[in-house]
Amino acid sequence: MDQRAALLALAVLGITALAALPTKGGTPTYVQSEVYGIWTIDRSPYFLVDNVTVPAGKALRIDAGVEVRADRGVGLQILGSLTVNGTADAPVRFTANATAASPGFWVGLWATNATLVVLDHALVDDAETGFALVGGSASITGSSFTSNVHGLKVEIGSATIAETLVSGNTMAGVYARGASLSIRSSLFSGDYVGMTVAAASHALVENTTFLASSIGDLTLDTGSFVELRASAQQGKVKFLDAASRLDVEGILAVSVTDAFGSPVAGARVLVEDNGTSNATAETNHEGLVPGLVLLERQNTSAGGIDFNPFTVTATARGFRRTESVTVSGAANITLAVPADLTPPKPNADAFLTVDEGTPLWFDASASTDNDPTFATTGTFRWAFPDLGVALSGVRATYTFATPGTYEGVLTVTDAAGNGADVAFSVLVRDTKPPTITAVDLPDGGLVGETLAFHANATDDDRAFALKGSFVWRFALGSDAFERTGASVEIAFERPGLWAVTVVATDPTGNAASASRTISITAPPAPPAPPSAWPYVGGAAALLAAAIGLATERGKLGLLTLFLPLYTRLRDEEVLDQFTRGQIYGYIRVHPGDTYTDIKRNLSLNNGTLTYHLDVLERERLVRAVNRGSRKMFYTMEVRPAEDGGGLHEIQQRILRVLGEAPGAAVPDLAAVLGISRQLALYHLRLLVSQDLVRLERRGLRLIAFATGPPAPPP
């Protein structure tokens, strides 16, 4: 008996020791006739005082630790289903209700075409038949059938039996007739006959031990067939007919290595017996075929055939190794093919960093191989596909000219040509600042004039084009301000020699700068208005002529003819400056706007706007009207409206129109007021913010309603 079978025997025999443990229960329960439901430990022990039946369509469950005691000649019949839920520590025991019973005292458990039978950790003793199955199927695990007449009977049904003890039964441990049995990891010990298999029954007995049977381990009759697979028995087999057969099977585990002892995955293994059959398999990732089932010998009443020894051949990548092995129960064999088939294990730092322009060393000395000469016979190749660079040697060096992240591959090959790759990355840090190639700025400019500045720079970092930055700094004495971008536009508010500095910075923070100066001067004073004397003289002459005609109408005509001509000539010279003309045009379109409105809408700085408003007021083209804290501007031909609660003149007019025509559409309102639709909408939104007007969308038309008090009349 092999060591595994002996250990199994000791483990399973421990089940019987549990039968001697005192039963922990509560009030005894006496049962007879039909039973179903649940038998629990708090009502244990259960006494069978007469035959008990689980009816068809009903189920009985017996919980762990329950004890069932039966009177003489009484048994438990299962027509429905029986589930025994014992455990290794708390089995369910079925026994005789007697202090000194003998085999056959009570009938036992028998199932006839039952729906379900599960016996888990059940101990059955002193019965006529511990468990009998007629038709249907049963599952038995971790149980014990001892000191019965028959341990188990299976007729015209199937049973799966695992980790179970069958011991000391006075007839057969297991009797099968027209049945199918699967017995695994169990023990037969001290039975009169271990197993009787008859009437074309089939039994697969795997990893099971037969000990000390009285007349035989196995009896086969009427065309029965038994497979003993890796099971220990003493050769006590009796054939009662010529058709019955016993196959003794063993399990062979095969390991395949290369010449240096490394496991070889995917090797083809061929096992041939002494001339009748063969088996094939392929090694797994550990170089193993864990278990091949082989027919060791075949026995019938006429004698036996022994198929040992077996020839085992391993083939891998065209290399072959063959050896012979004798299998008895379980065997192991290792075949080493005569070649190095195992690739090296490359080892290199997965991530490296270096400054641009600085040499970087690569080291693969930690790479390993099963070939002991690998350190001197192996080859090492470092490749950077994006750069088209390849280096060789256990240690190699390279200098990266430009920053960035580079992907590399280390390929290690042993003397037999086995190769393996490992990928790695190199981060090359950017340490060089950009180079400013051009700084373009005007030669000079005027206060309030918009001037353009532009700079160009290059960098060895490819990311500079997208992520680089430019910062401009303009300084004059204590005044300084900054702008960002390669191109900026600036209007200076003070005259003087301004210092201009541009700083170019790459994505990693390296910076370069360039400095220039620009002279800003004050705008020239407006030219003196042309002399009016020639016009006055001409007007006087015409006036004299008119007087000579002695008509007031003639005098009025002369004034109307010449005075606007003088005014128009003067205005055109004053408004000839672009920014000043822009301001004047804005005030004509937006009469009554404040200083803040003009500055925001024309995007002017304080100095420029103040200067040009002073000129326009001095030349009497524009006038300012103070309304409380607000200062509003009008062209000279516009008469400022009354206060109107501090509202803009246009806003007052809007409220008056809406008071007379509520629900006016914005285009209609603009036409009535003689202003643009955009200007009307601008003032309407200001009135909405003061809760004086409500705007509504009617289809594609936007209409307005006055919600506050009407504007005072002009």
Image: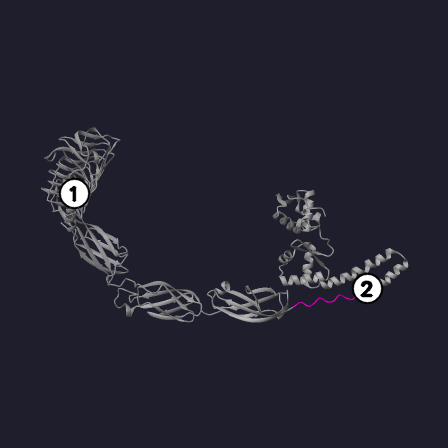
Does the magenta run of residues contain 531? Answer: yes
Please state the extent of the stretch shown in magenta in the rendering. 522-533
Q: Position of residue 670 (x, y in %)?
A: 68, 48
- Write down the quadrant of residue 343 in the picture: bottom left
Q: Is residue 434 visible?
A: no
**675 or 440, which lies in front?**
675
Q: Is residue 418 above or below residue 281?
A: below
**67 or 117, which lies in front?**
67
Q: Is residue 361 above or below residue 595?
A: below
Q: Determine the residue positioned at 85% across, 58% down.
A: 555
Tell me which amino acid carries mark 2: Tyr
Residue indicated by mark 1: 15
Q: Position of residue 645 (x, y in %)?
A: 66, 49
For discs 2 and 1, the disc positioned in front in the rendered view: 2
Q: Magenta region's main secondary structure?
A: loop
Q: Callout 1: few (<14), some (14-19), or many (20+) C-alpha neighbours within 10 Å?
A: many
Does the magenta run of residues contain 261? Answer: no
Q: Position of residue 104 (x, y in %)?
A: 12, 34
